[in-house]
Image (cartoon, grey):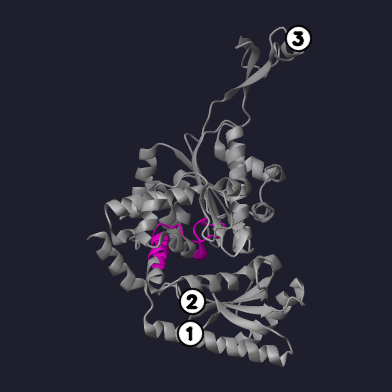
Amino acid sequence: MNLKMVCENVSQKISPSEEDKRKVHNLSTDLIRRIEEEAGNLKINVNPILVGSIAKDTWIKTNPDIDLFIVFPRTYTNEEIGELGLKIARKVTGGKGKEQYAEHPYLRSEVEGFQVDFVPSFEISDATELISSVDRTPLHTSYIKKNFDESLKKEVRLLKQFLIGINAYGAEIKVGGFSGYLCELLLINYSSFQDLLEACIKWKKQHVIDIAHHYSEEKEIKKIFSEPLVVIDPIDPKRNVSAALSNQKIAEFKAAAKAFLEAPSETFFFPKEITPLNLEELQNLIQTKGTDTLFLVFETPKVPPDTLWGQLYKSIEAIKNFLESEDFKIVNKDVWSETETVFLFEFESATISKTYKHSGPPTGSSGQTPFLKKYTKSDKSISGPRIENGRWIVELPRKFTKADKLLHYELRNKLTSLGLGKHIANKISEHFDLFLNMEIHDFYSKNPDFAQFLTKYYLGRPSWLLS
């Protein structure tokens, strides 16, 4: 199929019907009415409004999340709107829902099959009055509604589904991808999904988009913002809408864009589910690669998602740095997390030499005599002292030659020195397991989602190349 036909077929699958829109808007209207009633009963002055993709009519049929903002006058404090917003939301939902946290708490609840977020915010007329970051959201909604027509709505839905398909949608820390608002601004700037794909391939580092022309010169923007893509918020010139977007997701987007333009396929929008390898296939693939993979498994701490993933990424990087400082060569790393978390470290080899080179002082320096005195007759000296590149060298025995043994010792005895995230360190201190290669087989067999994750990891291809 050609590009136009593929996009038309995808649009038909993801665009909400008039009945879909009627259902979600009726529920939203009813919830707003109930918020007003409960706020009135509590004698609280608020203005509830529908925001986000449903308010802008840019939502995808399969993802109809409802965002309701409970907007307070600025006479209230941050603490007050958090407390009162939750109180109102719980009244509306009959106490159902789970408390979430951004800059202040909000309630996430399921209502008639829809996920609904009840978010307190302050009423502002422009970004200069900003108190909390969510206060901009109603202004974002108004801006998009004023600048979007039916054609752009269709185009942005295509973009969102494309990003979902290549796993690059969502600005949360776990993903580091494109937010919905960023997608909408990109379509205002480029006018169509196809034009955006063609343009993004040519993006250079620190590409700048300033739709509202807040700045007179691009170099002025680049002095202020250092991110790989800079999209100035039309309603707040001090904000880069794409600040959370990682280099990795930009690269994945550009690669997928080029591949799609060359060979259009619905696979980019709806990748096929990957069937996990059976244990024999998994073992054969591990043996074929010839590397060693170490799995660190522990219970996932119950903290907000952005807090969790920020600490997960920090912690896995800290462990990687420690292992590399001990001369283990790591090929790759990754993390999977549900009720339990798995850190994955793939080594060239999980076993290294029994000795290591210890570098001493330069020859002829003041440190030469004490160094030679210490190591010439030492039982620990396996080889040397000798001279290499103008310095004294001695070969000493390692305490650990296996990565799993080293990491086990470090986590048991020197956990606080590794620099892990607080919540991650606490959970590891309670209990952890280490598995090398196929020792993971029981966990793999009992966790289908992890099995799919590990299969994708070992296959090592983006979703659109796996189908």
Name the residue nearer the viewer: 400 or 79: 79
Locate the N terminus by quadrant.
bottom left
Tell me the quarter of the picture where residue 381 sits: top right
- The kind of residue tagged 1 is His
Q: N-terminal of the two: label 1 or label 2?
A: 1
**Secondary structure state at the residue bearing disc 3:** helix
**Secondary structure state at the residue bearing disc 2:** helix
Q: Neighbour class for label 2 at 10 Å: few (<14), some, many (≥20)?
A: many
Q: Are marks 1 and 2 in contact (CB under 8 Å)?
A: yes
**Secondary structure state at the residue bearing disc 1:** helix
Q: Residue at x 59, y 73 (%)?
A: 138
Circle 3 sits on which residue? Answer: 369
Q: Are marks 3 and 1 in contact (CB under 8 Å)?
A: no
Furthest residue in direction front, as rendered: 216
Locate the C terminus by quadrant.
bottom left
Residue 54: assigned label: 2
**Above or below for 220 versus 351:** below
Q: Neighbour class for label 3 at 10 Å: few (<14), some, many (≥20)?
A: few
Q: Is residue 117 left or right of residue 158?
A: right
Q: Which mark lies nearer to you, 2 or 3?
A: 2
Residue 176 lies in the magenta-colored region: yes
